[in-house]
Image (cartoon, rainbow, N blue to C red):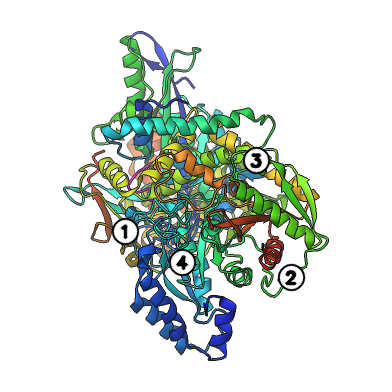
Amino acid sequence: MSSLIQGKFSKWETVIGLEIHAQIKSNSKLFSSSSTKFGSSPNSQVSLFDAAMPGMLPVINEFCIKQAVKTGLGLKAKINRYSVFDRKNYFYADLPQGYQISQYKHPIIGEGAVTIDFKDGSSKDIRIVRLHLEQDAGKSLHDQNPSKTYVDLNRSGVALMEIVSEPDLNSSHEASLYITKIRSILMYLDTCDGNMQEGSLRTDVNISVRKPGEELGTRCEIKNLNSIKFIKQAIEYEAMRQIKIIEEGGIIEQNTLLFNPQLGKTKPMRSKEEAHDYRYFPDPDLLPLKLEDDFIEIIKKDIPELPDERKKRYINEYKLSNYDSSVLTIEKSISDYFDKVLGCHQDLKKSAKLVVNWITSELFAILKKNEVEIHNSPITPYNLGQLVKLIISNKISGKIAKDVFEDMYKNSLSPEEIVNSRGLAQVTNVKEIELIIDQILKLNYDKVNDYKAGKTKLLGFFVGQAMQISKGKANPKILNDILIKKLS
Amino acid sequence: MEFNTITESLEKINSNKISIVELNDIFINRIKKNKNLNAFIYFDEENISQQIKKIQSSKKNFKLKGIPLAIKDLFCTKNMPTTAGSKILQNFQPSYESHVSQKLLDQGSIFLGKANCDEFAMGSATNTSYYGNTINPISPRGSQLVPGGSSGGSAAAVAANLCLGATGTDTGGSIRQPASFCGVVGIKPTYGLCSRWGIIAFASSLDQAGVFANNIADTAILLREIAGHDNKDSTSANREIPNYFENLNQDMSGKVVGVPKEYILPDIPEDISKIWEQAIKSLERGGVKVKNISLPHTKYALPAYYIIAPAEASSNLARYDGVRYGFRSEEGTSLDEMYELTRSEGFGKEVKRRVLIGTYVLSAGYYEAYYMKAQKVRRLISNDFNEAFNECDFILTPTAPSPAFPIGEKEDDPIKMYLNDIFTVPASLAGIPGISIPFGKSQNGLPLGIQLLSKHFDEQLVLNAGLYLEKNNV
Amino acid sequence: MKIDKNTTLKIAKLCRIKVRDEEIEELSSQLSSILDWVEKLNEVNTDNIEPLNNVSIATLPLRKDKENLQDQSKEVLSNAPEKLENYFAVPKVVE
Ligand SMILES: [Mg+2]
Ligand SMILES: [Zn+2]
């Protein structure tokens, strides 16, 4: 998939590496027992340790380690038996200790990979460099008071996994597919809630441009983007900015940038002379983390079927396309819904594609219109399965099915109940259909002559008339067959 | 003097020969009479009487019932302010009690006050405290000597009988050196024996809590009470704590003492070499075999320490930023200005020097050459001890290279001041236990200390050898 | 290592300590002599020696993931030099 950008004079390739900060799903923080709940009143979930009171010490949360290992396994990555917690030293109002406990030289997870899928059926592997554990910072609020910044430490110390990719991404589209895929894997694993609005998934984008085949250019880092839309916008803006500078004879300065969504622009975060020197060193309050094989084996048993495996299963068992399968599996809730529908009846497995169409067109549309999440859908997987079954067994036509579907959504009824109470069952009785056809042929005597004279396009008109009389219930195939027979 | 040991006082309290109030009044009056020593940063009679009331009304079987103690102002205390000797923590009132001091409270001891110390335990003379110098009570008439440091207030308070025992912390000698200067016993246990939780951190990989007392028996009693595993400190060792007091045994026959040749320095005063020899001879008379040993990397201990400790300190002290507690400069309109002014006004000279050195040795381009190098040398020093302990059971050295010196001396030369810890720092880097006990006097009649070192968690052995030397002094 | 005035100022900035003009000279020379002194370590051959970062015998203890739901904000804010509406307040940060 070509993703080169046309500059003024030549084509450019964008080179992107991402650092994703994923908040670990856990009850308590990485080094303290404060709650990780989102949206509580200011400083209500802050322990003495989180506030860096003198003499307070960190004690690590075992579950957070398990979550990191689980994620590492999900990313097909190397689990490091030995890792070290380091201090990353810098000053900021919402960093109470004056350092962040992170992992630098020896992260808990090493190299891994994820696959992204394109619409044309192709795919691409993105390499993961590492995943390490670290503390989240608190929050600074700059607009509560004209002369003050307010500091809320509720988030301070919540566990993060920083997932660092190789610069294997070459467009904003690839970046968005990659983040979507990582988010999907995390949610399948249940190691992160994936809630981007609440900041559970935040991304730093490292971006440079070059002419295809040339050396890597100087990169800039865009910090802390918390929506896929902004990530795409920021990448597109920044790539063009860099291309423009180079094409005008300038050079790119390595810089840390912030993206302003209102303006759609990036701007430097701090000037050069204030460049950070984090002075990493092993945290003397914590000993190295050593993982035993047993510990990892137990976690392995807990790994659910992941999107790629599900995708393969759909392709193999249901003969679905690569693209359909990846659309279904990217959101665990959709894929779970689909699996439940197919679980309703053996016959549905042969009509999986029909089920996919019902989910991705009718169901998505109605859920979106009503702003309902799929796991809360008033149409249960079982009922949707029954509906598709009615179609494939010719009990109702596809057209009637849409009508039934609307009714199912509104009244949470089963399709049989609706079909029966409204008398919508398809008419397959040949005699009954013959009667209808005779009726319309008699009424449209002139058109019958036209047809016989060669105007065969009129067949659609007769079908329409007959259907109208049957209130859409006549089996279309039988109807068609009889019509043709009677007209010839 | 009556009531100058814990053992005696406990016996009299438990047999109702004296009440807790009466016992503590003796010490309260002494503190009031000796205000000039400036041994305490915080002392409040009302606070003491509250504590006494609580102990009196309790039916619990306390092991340190009514025993008056001084707590180094580096331990966070729930009912007394805690400053670490720094302006930056002026008026800081912790809402929590350090693990070690809580254990002492749980046994019914009385905290008379918070003992003065060098600012953030950085010093060897208790002259960097924002709250003024502490004066060594053994100062001859007309002179003022330093008590050593950083736990100088604790050592001075015990030496002047202002309390029966005191807590201290030792990062590179901060218990042993002042014990030597003041003529009291001071022990720095194995790293990890006592919890660091609630103790204001200086250099986390070196900091250890310990105690001062007037003799070995009292030291053993106090050490037993403060030692023990704490799940709030991830470096705390999970081990059975022996009853050091009951296990005291001065029979040293058959033991091997190591005498490291690298501790024989050319410019050490003669009287110090003399007491060292006397101690060796005394042990020999008790049936101890003397072995000359080598700790080849000894002379690199101090430089390694003065990289590692400031590096950790520069990070540990980053939290003092005027945001959540402590002093904040009134000036400064931006956040960075507020930080810089707060830390510049709130920290004293020595602390700032060490924070700057520590920042430098960790900074980009220098980490490998300084910090990493120092940690490698630390490994060699630790290996030296491991090898030595294949040949001997414990090691005997002087505690400090000089007796207590006059206040004001060495003040303008940081390196000269750092050399005070030359004999104590190696054991800190290796994390092994060390004790200083008074042994002999200098030509001018000042107390001198002798240091005993042993393997990790072999506190009992240094206590026993200390007891032997205490009973077989010159 | 000779620490010049600029280096002193650079480190001071990193650790957020204001150094006044009249202090720079003396401080730089003190830092220089301390660094000169510790450079004695260069005499030691440390090839193939692993750094010793910690002397504790413990293995890293792991805590159970149990949350404390108690609101400790009163305790946590009680020493704050400036607090407003249950927030710590600092001079305005312009980003
Ligand atoms: Mg980053
Ligand atoms: Zn990070």
Q: Name the residue beneath numbered marker 3.
A: B298
Q: Chain of mark 1?
A: B
Q: Which residues are magenta?
A: A91-96
Residue at label 4? B157
Q: Nearer the viewer, residue A247 or B326?
A: B326
- Of the numbered discs 1 and 4, the one sitting upstream in the chain is 1
First along the sequence among labels 2 and 4: 4
Earlier sequence position, callout 2 versus callout 1: 1
> How many angstroms separate mark 3 from mark 1 (CA)?
38 Å
Of the numbered discs in the image, which one, if any, rests on residue B90?
1
State which chain disc 2 sits on: B
* Labels 2 and 4 positioned on one and the same chain: yes
Q: Amino acid at mark 2?
A: Asn
Residue A94 is one of the magenta-drawn residues: yes
Structural distance between the alpha carbons of marks 3 and 2: 31 Å
Between marks 2 and 1 in the image, the one whose residue lies nearer the viewer: 2
Label 4: chain?
Answer: B
Q: Is residue B300 left or right of residue A334?
A: right
* N-term-proximal mark, 3 vs 2: 2
Disc 4 and disc 3: Cα gap in Å?
Answer: 32 Å
